[in-house]
Image: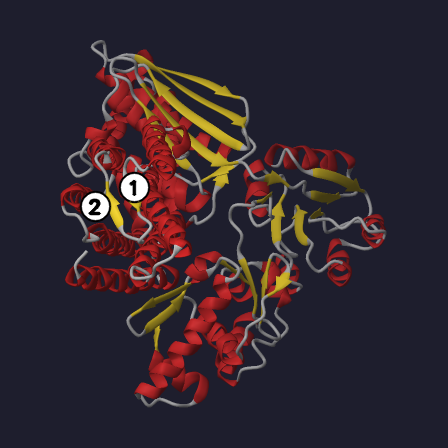
């Protein structure tokens, strides 16, 4: 090999090593890379770094003579070949993952790719003993042999498989994802083919690193845009869903059907108006509903919608229910748009205009599965244009809500001519049994209250008492109730006196008064009870009051607990979070105080350290503190909590459990826990403390 070629190879190797190290660093510090994509890129660049190091080591030891150096060179060439081929398999796995294949090991294309890599590995091992592909002679000189091109065939075939996967799944990938994988696969495959005919120059080294950097850039660009798009969508999602579901043609048709019934069947018209108002009320309530709601409540909304449709279509639409499991929650306005699609694009597309819809639920493998199946003609979901079909935009909205609110997924199976089945899969979580005390001196009222609670919360454990003193004795003995439903006017200690004593024994127990009198309402809320219901209570009343009870302890959606009242403290899974710098903790406190609003580095410096000079030194200081804060959060897997764009910084309040935020939302537990102290360690927090103090008054 000439000296010029060796210099070129050395330049390629050094440049490749520098670029691959920079790529790896960028992966670790990049904020907008999804976890799975980050894992694949880490694997890819680690292999690239190892590959480039073997090439660099060979170039640096080329002139060394001796048996030891010969053995070392043979090892380096073997490692180069194995690592280069391994990159192609990593790309196959990464590509399949981005196309939505959950377990690529079960995918036939991946198995074929891995099989070809195995053939490549076998050829490399055979060459160690036969030298039929290449040899390193006793003078430490590398030479190709007659069958060397055979070695390239499996690697090139793997890249062709990657191109096939890319083409077959092009509809599932964004434009930038397609560009990223196309560039990597094409550049690498072309360099492999050229390498067969161009002996001596390590073209694959630099081309692989450059292609990987291009892919990384496109993927980061794509996921950054996706991140901000999701943030924007979340702000508009409730209104979008509202507008998507309450469409003018549906309102007009429903009102027309009710109008026609007014003269012919007034009773049916009256029933239709009730169903129509229930339907609209649920849609309006969804605008302010951030939490998942009980399945029965969502089902009632669907039934109201179906009754309105049956006013129009009569018995042309048949509905069948198979509800094996109903004790779970899901995002509001989830089922109704899917049922609407089943009618419009399923049943009504039949030649007869008639058909059946089946709604079923089942719990299996730690998940809840809700299916909506119709016997319509079916459709090809992948060919539907969201821009062209508003109803199918509803499906995408539902998919987003299920993923963002419940961590679930939506699947569509619609073979042509065989109907459509839409399945919602939501993690079931682990049920926590709620302990509820019912206190009333009238036996029949106490029993009726108990039955109503069980209808609202079937998993509840209920203990009933005739006297408040007996309930206090139970609590003192260690039976700490989550909720107490108590009458007020009772012999002995009345409900008001009971609530005051209960707060000293169990401040976290929620107290809800159930009474036949309005007169005590002002006095009740003065002592900060959580609810005030007038007899007789309904199932809906109970569900509404139990809304803030932690029914499900989800392993999937851990939240950072932030305590602002008194001293500022942060907890993760029950353990305190320790900050390496006091300034990092204070910065986090300030961002929490801002309630998710963005603030500039100058605002931070002025508010926290009374320095508002926008100097480079100050910017560097803020940057160091922000990075330290992000590293602290990264250690507990919460690095996405901090949002940074240019010089603006904010905190995502939706993934934080904060007493301050809950108090602003009117949660009585948080209101009761405020004792006039808020972030007492920080002087800038005094203004917020004053606002909270007068708010509580």
Between the C-alphas of marks 1 and 2, the distance is: 9 Å
Please indicate whether residue 294 sits to the left or right of residue 307 in the image. Answer: right
Looking at the rendering, which quadrant does residue 114 occupy? top left
Looking at the rendering, which quadrant does residue 385 occupy? top left
* Front-lying residue, 658 or 310: 658
Q: Quadrant of the N terminus?
A: bottom left
Disc 1 packing (10 Å; few <14; some 14–19; many ≥20): many
* Front-lying residue, 264 or 193: 193
Dot 1 or dot 2, earlier in sequence: 1
Disc 2 packing (10 Å; few <14; some 14–19; many ≥20): many
Please provide percent x and percent y for residue 562.
55, 65
Secondary element at image label 1: helix
Relative height, residue 470 to residue 324 (above, below): below
Please provide percent x and percent y for residue 374.
33, 18
Residue occupying image coordinates x 45% and y 43%: 407
Q: Is residue 369 visible?
A: yes
Relative height, residue 346 to residue 427 (above, below): above
Secondary element at image label 2: helix
In the picture, the disc for residue 228 is none
Please provide percent x and percent y for residue 237.
32, 48
Q: Is residue 247 visible?
A: no
Residue occupying image coordinates x 20% and y 10%: 351
Please indicate whether residue 114 sits to the left or right of residue 579 in the image. Answer: left
Please provide percent x and percent y for residue 623.
38, 77
Residues at badges 1 and 2 in contact (C-beta under 8 Å)? yes
Direction top: furthest residue: 352
Q: Which residue is mark 1?
A: 88
Relative height, residue 49 to residue 40 (above, below): below
Q: Which residue is mark 2?
A: 188
Q: Quadrant of the C terminus?
A: bottom right
């Amino acid at each position: 090999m000439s000296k010029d070629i060796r210099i070129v190879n050395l330049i390629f190797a050094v440049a490749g090593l520098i670029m691959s190290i920079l790529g790896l660093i960028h992966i670790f510090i990049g904020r907008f890379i999804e976890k799975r994509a980050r894992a694949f890129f880490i694997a890819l660049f680690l292999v690239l770094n190892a590959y480039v190091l073997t090439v660099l080591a060979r170039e640096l030891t080329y002139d060394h003579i001796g048996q030891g150096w010969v053995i070392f060179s043979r090892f380096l060439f073997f490692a180069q070949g194995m690592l280069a081929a391994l990159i192609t398999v990593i790309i196959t796995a990464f590509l399949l993952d981005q196309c939505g294949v959950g377990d690529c090991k079960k995918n036939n294309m991946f198995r074929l790719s891995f099989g070809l890599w195995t053939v490549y590995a076998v050829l490399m091992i055979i060459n160690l003993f036969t030298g039929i592909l290449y040899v390193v002679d006793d003078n430490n000189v590398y030479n190709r042999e007659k069958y060397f091109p055979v070695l390239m065939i499996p690697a090139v075939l793997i890249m062709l498989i990657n191109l096939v996967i890319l083409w077959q799944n092009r509809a599932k990938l964004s434009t930038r994802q397609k560009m990223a994988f196309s560039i990597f696969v094409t550049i690498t495959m072309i360099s492999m083919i050229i390498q067969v005919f161009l002996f001596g120059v390590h073209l694959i080294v630099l081309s692989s690193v450059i292609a990987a950097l291009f892919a990384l850039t496109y993927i980061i660009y794509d996921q950054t845009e996706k991140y901000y798009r999701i943030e924007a969508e979340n702000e508009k999602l409730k209104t979008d869903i509202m507008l998507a579901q309450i469409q003018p043609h549906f309102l007009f048709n429903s009102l027309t059907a009710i109008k026609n019934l007014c003269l012919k069947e007034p009773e049916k018209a009256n029933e239709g108006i009730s169903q129509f108002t229930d339907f609209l009320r649920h849609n309006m309530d969804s605008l302010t509903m951030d939490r998942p709601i009980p399945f029965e409540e969502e089902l009632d909304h669907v039934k109201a919608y179906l009754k309105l449709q049956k006013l129009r279509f009569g018995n042309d639409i048949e509905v069948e229910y198979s509800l094996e499991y109903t004790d779970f929650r899901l995002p509001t306005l989830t089922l109704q748009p899917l049922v609407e699609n089943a009618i419009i694009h399923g049943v009504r597309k039949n030649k007869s205009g008639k058909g059946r819809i089946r709604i079923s639920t089942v719990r299996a493998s730690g998940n809840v599965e809700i299916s909506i199946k119709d016997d319509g003609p079916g459709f090809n979901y992948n060919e539907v244009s969201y821009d062209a079909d508003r109803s199918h935009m509803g499906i995408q909205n539902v998919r987003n809500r299920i993923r963002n609110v419940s961590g679930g997924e939506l699947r569509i199976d619609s073979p042509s001519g065989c109907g459509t089945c839409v399945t919602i899969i939501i993690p079931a979580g682990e049920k926590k049994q709620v302990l509820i005390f019912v206190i009333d001196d009238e036996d029949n009222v106490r029993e009726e209250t108990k039955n109503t609670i069980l209808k609202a919360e079937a998993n509840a454990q209920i203990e009933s008492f005739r006297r408040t003193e007996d309930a206090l004795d139970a609590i003192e003995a260690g039976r700490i109730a989550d909720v107490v439903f108590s009458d007020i006017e009772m012999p002995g200690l009345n409900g008001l006196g009971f609530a005051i004593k209960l707060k000293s024994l169990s401040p976290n127990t929620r107290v809800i008064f159930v009474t036949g009198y309005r007169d005590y309402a002002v006095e009740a809320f003065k002592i900060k009870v959580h609810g005030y219901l007038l007899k007789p209570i309904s199932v809906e009343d109970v569900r509404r009051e139990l809304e803030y009870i932690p029914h499900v302890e989800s392993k999937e959606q851990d939240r950072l607990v932030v305590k602002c009242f008194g001293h500022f403290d942060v907890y993760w899974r029950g353990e305190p979070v320790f900050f390496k710098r006091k300034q990092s903790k204070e910065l986090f406190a300030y961002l929490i105080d801002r309630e998710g609003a963005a603030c500039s580095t100058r605002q931070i410096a002025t508010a926290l350290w009374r320095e508002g000079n926008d100097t480079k030194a100050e910017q560097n200081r803020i940057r160091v503190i922000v990075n330290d804060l992000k590293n602290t959060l990264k250690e507990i897997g919460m690095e996405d909590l901090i949002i940074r764009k240019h010089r603006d910084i904010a905190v995502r309040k939706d993934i934080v459990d904060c007493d301050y935020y809950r108090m602003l939302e009117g949660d009585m537990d948080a209101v009761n826990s405020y004792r006039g102290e808020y972030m007492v360690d920080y002087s800038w927090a005094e203004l917020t403390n004053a606002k909270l103090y007068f708010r509580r008054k």
